[in-house]
Image (tube, helix red, strand yellow):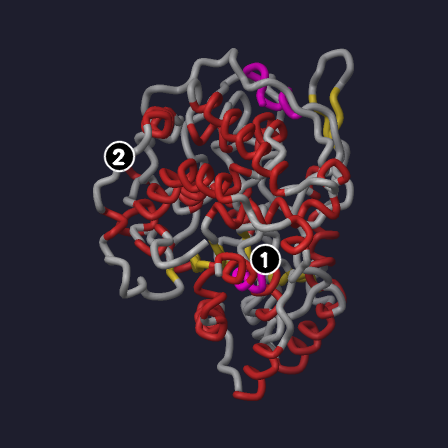
Amino acid sequence: MLAGMMMAAMLVCISMRSATIVSGLGAYSLGDYNDDINESVASGPIPSTIKPPTEALQFSPQVSRQVSSEVSPQVSSEVSPQVSPDAWSEPYKYPEWFEHAWPRTATSGVQDVFVGDRPLFPPCSFDPLEFRGYPFEEPRRYIRRSKNPCWYERPHEHNSLKCAPYFYLAGVAKGGTTDLFRRIRLHPDVMQGTQKEYHWWDRDRYRHLSKDPTTGDIQIHGGVPLRDYVDKVAGDDIKTLADELSRKGTSVKIFGDGSPSYLWDVFYWPVLDGNQGCVEPRMLTGQHIRHFYPAAKIILTFRHPTPRLYSRFLSRIPRTPELRKDTSKDFHRYVVRAIHHYKKCFSTWSIRHCTYNHTVYQESTIRLMEGFYPVFMADWLRIWPKEQMLILRCEDYSKNMKAVLQRVFDFLELDELTETQWANITAVDHANVGDMYEKVGKILPETKAILDEFYEPFVRKFAQIMQDSRFLWLDTTH
């Protein structure tokens, strides 16, 4: 029965070595990828030269507002009748390693401060000679008659029209994003673009990096410009939108970006301006997206972290040479090693620091930290207003796809569909249905037990931050 439920879920749920943090990146460039990174990225030891932050850092009062009352995002469905709506608030004894490491972060004391596109905490370095990181992309003069953020590069020249995404399906990998994004694009007012994942905000923008052999400084060589990114986002559909603007004077067509790693970038945050000297980020991908288009809509779909991690491991096997002969026993070995690496980091540093630590990520083989949901949501809830976020569960999408899709379409303010259009959308085969479960086998019971125990405090904290018992996953079997 467990294997059957696992398959059902699969169908749809488809560094810092010194005060100059960029030195921990090493020298590398990115090759081809889907939702993963080049597997041979350089790594280094866990930072040990900078004292972990222990005191709360304060913002000025005028920018403060409470996350709990102002920034609760939209959720996709009601709590199961089998689960108390208040279960998230019930007493829970966190393990010592979590209880000690969670508040050690630089965001401690300011985690309720809504910042928008401003930094998450005060500067880490005031050295005027510090490495100059990537600045914001400034907003364009968006066309008011277009629902989607579009602009003319040359005023009044219709062939110079450019369009950025209206919405971002920003996480999480193996949380059903491929299938969901595919069906969203079947709505007649959602343009196809050229692909699902563009990875510009978290990767392609910074494609060419190298380290000076003499000084060790990181040097940036170009990267993919914004113009190329938005051209890929729009593709040939830019003509459709341009024609509609020309004929009707308005357009309700929209574009999206379904890159599921925008939520958890661990690679390039050190080269964002404002992160100089930091051992954990003050500036994230989310702030850069928000600054460029403040009205963007963010969709996030979460899955219980244990099956999500195993599904992620299976998905990487075909495209990762070092993993191609691996089995569920190898996965068990990776899990034990990864938990050891992260707990070692937690013993000295904050959970947030270790979550965003590129070195620990690379040493762990499996993507354990992608399931540290409360870290990411604690940050993103400070960046995006509640009305611009829709938070889903993969398990709900699996049980009632049409109901979840309706919420997504309502959130994106799309026109109602006819029954024929709904039939066409729901009849499409599920995306990312592979055969790796049959080839490799299901997760070992002992591995599942270890992961469930390790992830439990993260799940509890996530539900507490969301103030939503659905994210305890008490109503699901995984």
Q: Is residue 56 left or right of residue 355?
A: left
Q: Relative to 311, is 281 above or below?
A: above
Q: Position of residue 102 (x, y in %)?
A: 36, 30
Which secondary structure lies at badge 2?
loop
Where residue 346 sits in the image (x, y, percent)?
A: 44, 24
- At label 1, the amino acid type is Arg
Tell me the tag on residue 365: none
Q: Position of residue 26 (x, y in %)?
A: 69, 23
**Which residue is rendered at x = 44% and y = 64% of the image?**
396
Residue 280 relative to residue 265: left or right: left
Up/down of 218 relative to 314, above or below = above
Stretch of the chain drawn in magenta = 8-25
Specify few, some or many for label 2: CA neighbours under 10 Å numbering under 14, 14-19, or 20 or more: few
Residue 380 is left or right of residue 424, and the answer is left
The residue that label 2 is drawn on is 93
Query: Regarding mark 1 in the picture, which secondary structure is present there?
Result: loop
Whether 271 is drawn above or below 325: the answer is above
Label ID, residue 141 = 1
Q: Where is 137 relative to 61, above or below?
A: below
Which of 391 and 336 lies nearest the eye of the viewer? Answer: 336
